[in-house]
Amino acid sequence: MSNAVMDKPAAPAAIPTFTATLIIRRFDPEFDDEPRWQDFDVELHATDRVLDALHKIKWEQDGSLSFRRSCAHGVCGSDAMRINGKNRLACKTLIKDLDLTKPIYVEAIKGLPLEKDLIVDMEPFFQSYRDINPFLMAGHAPDKGKERVQSPVERARFDDTTKCILCAACTSSCPVFWTDGQYFGPAAIVNAHRFIFDSRDDSAQVRLDILNDKEGVWRCRTTFNCTEACPRGIQVTQAISEVKQAILRGRA
Ligand code: SF4
Ligand code: FES
């Protein structure tokens, strides 16, 4: 048996931390007439995201801070918020990628009724989504025992718009939506696009008629805010443009 003494493994080096200041727009309908800004200093690691900073504030400094989140990994779409004036998902925004020489401003997305702190009422957003019939409407049954066949080219036609996670970052970055709550908004049009260009669906014209409305696609002013805001990289403005073309010329 060997008498050699095993070296102890070296203790891992401490992961460096730094202090960031978050300035959060707070609103509690029970106590506040108007929203107010509140500062928090938080000790963070370079790998932390804005969502981690919000958790640290809630768990260690102020349990009343309210925000939505679920998956924490860019899948559920529940934590869209304005971070330094831009719509982003808090769980996909690394603190180290922000300018840490300045405070980080965090507030609720715009254009939807503010409920509490970073939480807005999403119902108007989801009503527009429901209005465009976001489900397959096929007028015929597939052959007995068969699937609805679709070629890779046909599937690719609407691939981009299948990626939507309904976070509302696009719709709530749209200046038309801010000033006109009736506008369907980019997310509803993206989800209409997903079915309008699906070769298995037979009701494209139903959705095109819905969007050929004074509150439909023609309200879009092509500002590209929506495309820049989309955390899934969907070409939102292009999808809106393709729906406009389909209204004018029919589905290609
Ligand atoms: S299109 Fe992009 S920004 Fe808009 S709701 Fe879908 S995922 Fe969010
Ligand atoms: S918490 Fe689910 S997308 Fe951010």
Image: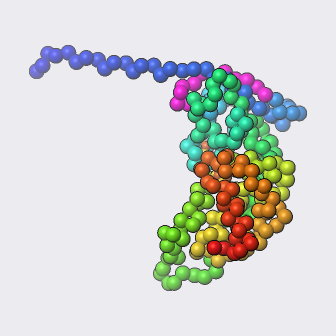
Does 216 appear above or below 58? below
- From the top left corner, tell me how far across and down residue 90 is, in percent: 63, 38
Out of 189 and 227, give the one closest to the viewer.
Answer: 227
- For the point 25% across and 17% down, which residue is it? 7
Does 152 appear above or below 75? below
- From the top left corner, tell me how far across and down residue 4 is, in percent: 16, 16
Placement of the N terminus among the 4 image quadrants: top left
Q: Give the extent of the magenta segment.
A: 37-48
Which image quarter: residue 58? top right
- From the top left corner, tell me how far across and down residue 112 is, in percent: 79, 47
The number of numbered discs placed on residues in the rendered structure image is: 0
Out of 33 and 166, give the one closest to the viewer.
Answer: 166
- For the point 89% across and 33% down, which residue is it? 33
The residue furthest bottom is 144
Magenta-colored segment: predominant secondary structure: strand
Out of 40 and 100, give the one closest to the viewer.
Answer: 100
Left or right, 3 with respect to 86, comes to left
Does 184 appear above or below 58? below
